Amino acid sequence: MKKRQIAILGSTGSIGTQALQVIEEHSDLYEVYCLTANNRVQLLAEQAHKFRPAAVVIANEERYDELKSLMDDLPDVKVYAGARALDEIVEADPIDMVLTAMVGFAGLSPTIHAIKARKAIALANKETLVVAGELILQLAQQYHVPILPVDSEHSAIFQSLVGEDDNPIEKILLTASGGPFRLMPQEQLATVTKADALRHPTWDMGAKITIDSATMMNKGFEVIEAKWLFGVEASQIEVLVHPQSIVHSAVQFHDGSVKAQLGVPDMRLPIQYALSFPRRLSLNSERLDLFKAQKLEFFRPDLEKFRCLALAFEAIKQGGNMPCIVNAANEIVNRAFLEDRCSFPQMADVIAQTMQRATFSASPDYDVYVQTDAEARAIAAELLNKTIVP
């Protein structure tokens, strides 16, 4: 049987490295065609030496010579650099599926190019649907391209819907761990540090998404993503704080039945399911033991304490390019917090003010999204520099 050729956008990140573990475990079924990274040249080169892809791409063109020198002993592996190279590599004929594990707005353009080249999409870059969900879904329908969710929550929803055909969804129950500050009084959030925020109680993720989890902006983005992936309104999506992270999400149907996907926290499972769907392959992992499991608890999120989640719901309500504005501002403040240039509460303050100042478009196209992203980033950066907060 011909091995399925996989391109991994963001192979050096948390999702990318775990995807490579899945591919290695099922090397009889999958083969790496392309690996890409933004800056992590050394790890990218190590991955290339192990998996021998047809090509590697480093998004930061300034790191090209460094990567090329590390690849001199692999003359059969093509080395490219830059955003244009990312767009072009996903169009390569041998590729069967593109796993989009890049972080942020940068994942939008190569995803669009992959869809237009009729490549199946395993979507881990949630910002793609947050920024341009309507456009992406239109393109996927136009080019008859499946979009398979990789986020644990959206994979859980997807798995719960398999076999349900056109049975209407009454409600999506989107679970959240609550992050490291779930039990912390709101007044103490002003003094938390990036080290505090990076200590996620359940998942081992990259720095950007871990901070987004701490603010619960990540869950807000997942609400937007779920709206587009599953064709529901935001009013049909309920966020449940579930500290044990055993129920990864659920679907409630019109007859009152609730179907959920449960398991131990292990991102390899949703990654593998996206690669193998509709098959379920063996996975060498810990099994959920319900006799030993903790009690399952569910709480409503505190939208005053976690303002970023409330801002995401507001962005959905306004529609248009507002989610794009929120995403751009969030990328700026997230980086600023990681660089100790703003406090934890200031992140929400800057995002809220950027939403007020950026140019709103009710019917954006791709060019508008690009312009919006640039404008919102500039506004958020200016607000940070002037430390303008309420």
Image (tube, rainbow, N blue to C red):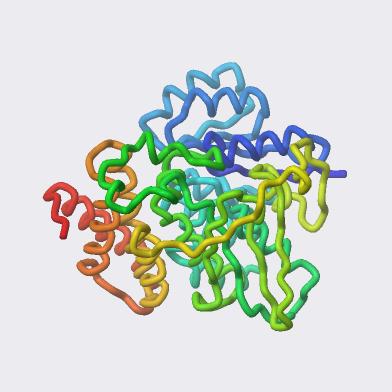
Q: Position of residue 348 (x, y in %)?
A: 29, 57
Comparing 347 with 148, the one in front is 347
| 319 displayed left or right of 292 | left
Whether residue 367 is situated above or below residue 84 in the rendered picture: below
Q: Position of residue 81 (x, y in %)?
A: 45, 36
Any part of residue 326 in sight: yes
Q: Quadrant of the C terminus?
A: bottom left
Looking at the image, the residue that sits furthest to the left is 386
Q: Quadrant of the N terminus?
A: top right
Whether residue 226 is situated above or below residue 267 in the rendered picture: below
| 109 displayed left or right of 169 | left
- Residue at position x 49%, y 72% in the image: 134
Q: Position of residue 338 (x, y in %)?
A: 32, 38
- Residue at position x 28%, y 36% in the image: 339
Quarter-of-image position of residue 371: bottom left
Quarter-of-image position of residue 208: top left
Comparing 243 with 160, the one in front is 243
Whether residue 115 is situated above or below residue 192 in the rendered picture: below
Any part of residue 119 in sight: no
- Residue at position x 44%, y 51% in the image: 182
Comparing 221 with 365, the one in front is 221
Comparing 49 with 173, the one in front is 173
- Residue at position x 26%, y 37% in the image: 340
Q: Position of residue 247 (x, y in %)?
A: 66, 56
| 288 displayed left or right of 241 | right
